[in-house]
Image (tube, rainbow, N blue to C red):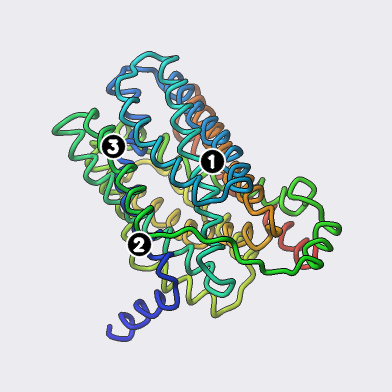
C-alpha cells in the first residue's frame, strides 16, 4: 500500500507551478458546469421538448462548439492563448446566467449557439498553454493532470447537480455555472502570468518542416487523426447525451442517481490516471498504438449495453469507457500538439477541438433520431460500430506514422 501511495505521489512530480494553477482553474470551472451533463434531461423533462427537438437544440450546442474551436484557434495564433482564455471564460460566465431565462425552441437554439461559440474558444487556448508551461518530456503528464482536474470537477458538479435538481430545480445550476466561470478567470489572472511559447525548432528547421509537410490543411495523417477523434467523440458523447435519458427510461434512475454513476468515471480517473500515464510513458508505446487500443474499448463499452436486463451493465459500461478515455484522450492531445508546427499551434489544436465539436453536433441529432425511430439498443449498436471504424483508421494512422508520413 505504501509503495502504491509513493508511486501515486511520484506521478505528480516535475510539473511546473503554472500547470498546477491551470489544473486548479480547470477544477473550479468544471465543477461549476453542472447543467451540461443534464442538458438533455432539462430540455425533455423540464421544458417538455420531444427527444427529436432536444436533439435539434443540442445540434446548436455542437455547432457553437465547432465555431468556437475554429475562432479560438485563429485568435490564439493572432493574440495568444492567455488573452483568449481570459475573454472566453469571462463572457461564458455571463452567457450561462442569461441562458436560464430562454425557454423557446429557437431562442434556446441561438442562445446555446452563442454561449458555446464563446465558451469553446477556450479549448484551443488551454491546449496550447500546455506547450508553453510544460516540457516535451512531461507534456502528456501535464495533460493528464489537467484532465484529472477537469474530470474531478465534472464529477463533483453532476453529483451536487443531481441533488440540486431534485431539491431546488434547474435554475440555480445556471447561476452556479456562470459565477464559477467568473471565479475561475479571476483566479487564473492572479495566479498565472502570460508566457510566450518556447521555440523547439530553429527558424531553418521550421521553414524546412513547412516546405515538406505544409500547414495543417495539407497534413494527410492529421486528417486521418481528425476522423479518429471525431468517431471517438461520437461514442463518448452518448455518455452525456442519450445515456442519462436511457438510465431514466430503462431503469428509472433519478438525476441524483445518474450523477453518482458519472462519479464512478471521475473516481477511477482521479485514483488511476496519473500513475497509469506514468507507467505507459515508461513502456514507451507510441501514441498511435495507444489510440488504437482506446478505440477498441470505446466500441466495446457500448456493445455491452445491448444486454439491457441488468442494471449492473451500466457500471460495466462506465468502467470500460473510463479505461478507454484514460488511454485515448491524453494521447490524442499529445499526438496533436507534438504534430503541430511552430507558429501554427492554434490551427492544429483548433482542428483537434473541432473534431469533437462536430462529433457533438452529429452525436446529438443522430443519437436521439435513432432512439426515437428504432430504440436505444440499435443506438448502442451503431455507437459501438463507430468505435470499430475508428480502430481501423487508427491502425492505418499508426502504419503511416511509422513510415514518417
**Picture quarter containing residue 44?**
top left
Neighbor class of circle 2 (other Cα within 10 Å; few <14, some 14-19, many 20+) is: some
Contact, mark 3 vs mark 2 (Cβ under 8 Å): no
Q: For numbered disc 3, what is the local secondary structure?
A: helix
Neighbor class of circle 1 (other Cα within 10 Å; few <14, some 14-19, many 20+) is: many
Residue 135 at x, y = what percent? 55, 71
Q: Is residue 71 visible?
A: yes
Structural distance between the alpha carbons of marks 2 and 1: 23 Å
Structural distance between the alpha carbons of marks 3 and 1: 20 Å
- Among numbered discs 3 and 1, the one appearing first in the sequence: 3
- Among numbered discs 3 and 2, the one appearing first in the sequence: 3
Structural distance between the alpha carbons of marks 3 and 2: 23 Å
Count how many numbered circles sit on residues in the image: 3
Neighbor class of circle 3 (other Cα within 10 Å; few <14, some 14-19, many 20+) is: some
Give the number of the mark in front: 3 or 1: 1
Along the horizontal axis of the image, is 99 left or right of 221? left
Which residue was labeled with disc 1? 383
Residue 325 at x, y = what percent? 48, 56
Which residue was labeled with disc 2? 268
Give the number of the mark in front: 2 or 1: 2
Q: For numbered disc 2, what is the local secondary structure?
A: helix
- Among numbered discs 2 and 1, the one appearing first in the sequence: 2
Amino acid at each position: 500500500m505504501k509503495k502504491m501511495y509513493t508511486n501515486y505521489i511520484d506521478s505528480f512530480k516535475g510539473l511546473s507551478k503554472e500547470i498546477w494553477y491551470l489544473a486548479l482553474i480547470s477544477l473550479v470551472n468544471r465543477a461549476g458546469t453542472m447543467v451540461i451533463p443534464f442538458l438533455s434531461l432539462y430540455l425533455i423533462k423540464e421544458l417538455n421538448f420531444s427527444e427529436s427537438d432536444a436533439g435539434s437544440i443540442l445540434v446548436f450546442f455542437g455547432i457553437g462548439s465547432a465555431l468556437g474551436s475554429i475562432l479560438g484557434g485563429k485568435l490564439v495564433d493572432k493574440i495568444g492563448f492567455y488573452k483568449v482564455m481570459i475573454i472566453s471564460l469571462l463572457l461564458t460566465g455571463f452567457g450561462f446566467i442569461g441562458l436560464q431565462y430562454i425557454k423557446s425552441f429557437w431562442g434556446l437554439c441561438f442562445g446555446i449557439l452563442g454561449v458555446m461559440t464563446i465558451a469553446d474558444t477556450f479549448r484551443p487556448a488551454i491546449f496550447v498553454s500546455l506547450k508553453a508551461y510544460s516540457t516535451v518530456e512531461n507534456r502528456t503528464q501535464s495533460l493528464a493532470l489537467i484532465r484529472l482536474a477537469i474530470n474531478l470537477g465534472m464529477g463533483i458538479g453532476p453529483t451536487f447537480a443531481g441533488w440540486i435538481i431534485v431539491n431546488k430545480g434547474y435554475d440555480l445550476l445556471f447561476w452556479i455555472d456562470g459565477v464559477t466561470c467568473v471565479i475561475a478567470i479571476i483566479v487564473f489572472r492572479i495566479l498565472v502570468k502570460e508566457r510566450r511559447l518556447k521555440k523547439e525548432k530553429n527558424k531553418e528547421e521550421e521553414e524546412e518542416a513547412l516546405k515538406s509537410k505544409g500547414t495543417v490543411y495539407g497534413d494527410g495523417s492529421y486528417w486521418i487523426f481528425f476522423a479518429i477523434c471525431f468517431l471517438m467523440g461520437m461514442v463518448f458523447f452518448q455518455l452525456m447525451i442519450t445515456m442519462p435519458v436511457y438510465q431514466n427510461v430503462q431503469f428509472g434512475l433519478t438525476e441524483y442517481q445518474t450523477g453518482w454513476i458519472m462519479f464512478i468515471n471521475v473516481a477511477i480517473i482521479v485514483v488511476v490516471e496519473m500513475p497509469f500515464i506514468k507507467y505507459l510513458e515508461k513502456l514507451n508505446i507510441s501514441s498511435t498504438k495507444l489510440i488504437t487500443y482506446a478505440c477498441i474499448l470505446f466500441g466495446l463499452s457500448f456493445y455491452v449495453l445491448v444486454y439491457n436486463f441488468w442494471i449492473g451493465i451500466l457500471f460495466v459500461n462506465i468502467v470500460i469507457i473510463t479505461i478507454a478515455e484514460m488511454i485515448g484522450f491524453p494521447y490524442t492531445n499529445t499526438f496533436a500538439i507534438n504534430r503541430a508546427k511552430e507558429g501554427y499551434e492554434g490551427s492544429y489544436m483548433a482542428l483537434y477541438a473541432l473534431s469533437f465539436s462536430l462529433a457533438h453536433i452529429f452525436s446529438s441529432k443522430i443519437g436521439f433520431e435513432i432512439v426515437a425511430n428504432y430504440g436505444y439498443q440499435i443506438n448502442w449498436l451503431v455507437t459501438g460500430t463507430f468505435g470499430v471504424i475508428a480502430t481501423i483508421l487508427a491502425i492505418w494512422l499508426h502504419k503511416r506514422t511509422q513510415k514518417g508520413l
